[in-house]
Image (spheres, grey):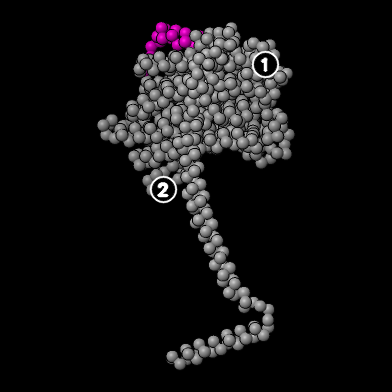
Amino acid sequence: MPNQPDLQLWLIPVFPLIGAFLNGTLGRNWSKGLIAGVAIGASALSFVWVVKTLSALGQLDTAHVERYFTWIASGDLNVGFDLAVDRLSSVMLLVVTGVGTLIHVYAVGYMDHDKGFWRFFSYLNLFLFFMLILVLAQNFLLLFVGWEGVGLCSYLLIGFYFLEKYAGDAAKKAFVVNRVGDFGFSLAMLLMVVQFGSLDMTKVFTAAKAMPVEAQSGILTAIALLLVVGACGKSAQVPLYVWLPDAMAGPTPVSALIHAATMVTAGVYVVARSSEVFLKAPLAMEVVAVIGLLTAVVAALIGTAQNDIKKVFAYSTVSQLGYMFVGLGVGAFSAGIFHVVTHAFFKALLFLGAGSVIHALHGEQDLARMGGLRSKIPITYWTLMAAALAIAGVWPFAGFHSKDAILLAAHAHAPWMFWVGVVTAGLTAFYVFRAIFLCFFGEYRGHAHPHESPAIMYMPLVILALLSVAGGYLPIMDWIAPLFPEAHEAHDMTLVLISVGFGLAGILAAYYVYVLKPGTAEASAARLGGLYRAIANKFYVDEAYDAAIVHPLEQGSRAVLLHGVEQVVVEGGLKGTVAMVRGFGGLFRHLQGGNIRSYAVYALLGAVVFLGLMVAKGGSQ
């Protein structure tokens, strides 16, 4: 397709950047209505421009690239500020701007009484800017700018309530864990420069595709594995998943936008975008699949014992991201991206629905203090039910279609992966409906007076509920399939019925335990003993990290940096300098005694010394 610079792709990210700048610099003195109008308008304009651009591009049989200027030129390396759209990025653009706009609308109602209203929407717009740069980038370095930018905004939004220690700790945890992944991503880019002399995606992928397997497949495996390290950080996979549940410290719209629909899918997007490299590195693909499966199982188990409604959905996010990784790892790239889209619908709805419950209960998040809310907040109940059925993989809801595609591909790759996947699907249905039943069924166990959320909050819920019901029929897989050389598994009705059966079994089990026999859960927990305590304590992973990494670093820093470098070198050096200056000052202060006769004597002595030197100099000549 010929280059069409008049499409002005740069406007897609610039609209939210302008919104972030205006609210960040002027919003403190604006009304909330004006702040909301600027933020929502910026996001909506970006969505409209995406639709306009895709309408103009049509079928997108080839990528549309716009080159603006040379960003870095060093020797043979040339990195431009280049933006591109193809079938894969077009899907991500619609999700980021479309779901992002709905979340902006919802946030107006949710954050209405917050003093940092202007600051919140500035951060939210800035996040959209960086996420759009990440998706549009035509080279890995520009993508990395967006990658780091969403990490920065995640830090700002998770720690939005920065006066609270828990929020600051959660923000720092997310920031540090993601830096581990980013280090791997950086090394991958360095290897690309060494091997291919470029960071341009077209050049890198063309060279990787042309490279014979026996030639230098080792370097491609190394690049792919390092990209996986980066993806595990952003997409919260084992062992770097620990930051995402703590990220619930931020306002609920943050959880919906960043940690459900967009940022956490960045790792999935990069692996899919780099499919040409991964297809040449089968070991790396196997690693992706195994990591995804392990993450899905571990997160699902932990989710069964969480009592904070946002934490339950946070672990479901980690688990669903694991499913996406399984799809990518077994070569079903289009199925993995399809699940990104459906997940954006039902997971954003789960978080926003949780926010509506929290809003109704005046800040309460503990499931033990909920119950019986069906009649009190019916819109929230029915929309959340649609999201729960979607994530459980019940037909015809959206999650059924995308999860079914991943599980079929997993069965074709290795049947044992399918069976682990369907068991995990049953666990997912169990713990999500556990939250639904504890929240909406039985007797109300709280103290607040529940009330339905205002229209500005529940209208986005209704739209997302419709997408959670019908989103599975969007032709996403057919649209992006031409980008990937993958064979689709035939639709096996037996396998489909098995996966749906496990999901329904999970729902029925949750209904039995938490509605029909409410005391069963406590009795079962007592019988499980140490196993249940391990699950409830998240398998002590955080404690293990603290013992193995955090505490040794803290103690080492105190011993070496504080007591060694700081106190001995820095303070000792400064004290020595001060003592030396004082010593010289003590010697010379007597010269400034204020006695005129002393000054005359000093002047006379100086003259004598000077004349003596002159005479000595003349005699030597």
Does the rendering let one see residue 139? no
- The amino acid at mark 2 is Ser
In the drawing, does residue 587 fall left or right of residue 142? right
**At numbered mark 2, what does the secondary structure look like: helix, strand or loop?**
strand
Along the line of sight, the residue nearer the viewer: 487 or 376: 376
Q: Position of residue 245 (x, y in %)?
A: 54, 27
In the image, residue 220 sits, relative to residue 408, either above or below, namely below
Q: Quadrant of the C terminus?
A: bottom left
Tell me which corner region of the image, top left, top right, bottom left or bottom right, holds residue 462.
top right
Q: CA distance from mark 1 to mark 2?
A: 66 Å
What residue is at 54 percent from the left and 87 percent from the top? Answer: 609
- The amino acid at mark 1 is Arg
**Magenta extent:** 487-504
Q: Quadrant of the N terminus?
A: top left
In the image, residue 480 sits, relative to residue 277, either above or below, namely above
| Mark 2 Cα-neighbour bin, 10 Å: few <14, some 14–19, many ≥20 | few
Q: Position of residue 365 (x, y in %)?
A: 63, 23
> Nearer the N terminus, badge 1 or badge 2?
2
- List the residue tagged with mark 1: 445
- List the residue tagged with mark 2: 74
Can residue 491 be found in the magenta stretch?
A: yes
Q: Position of residue 604 (x, y in %)?
A: 60, 87
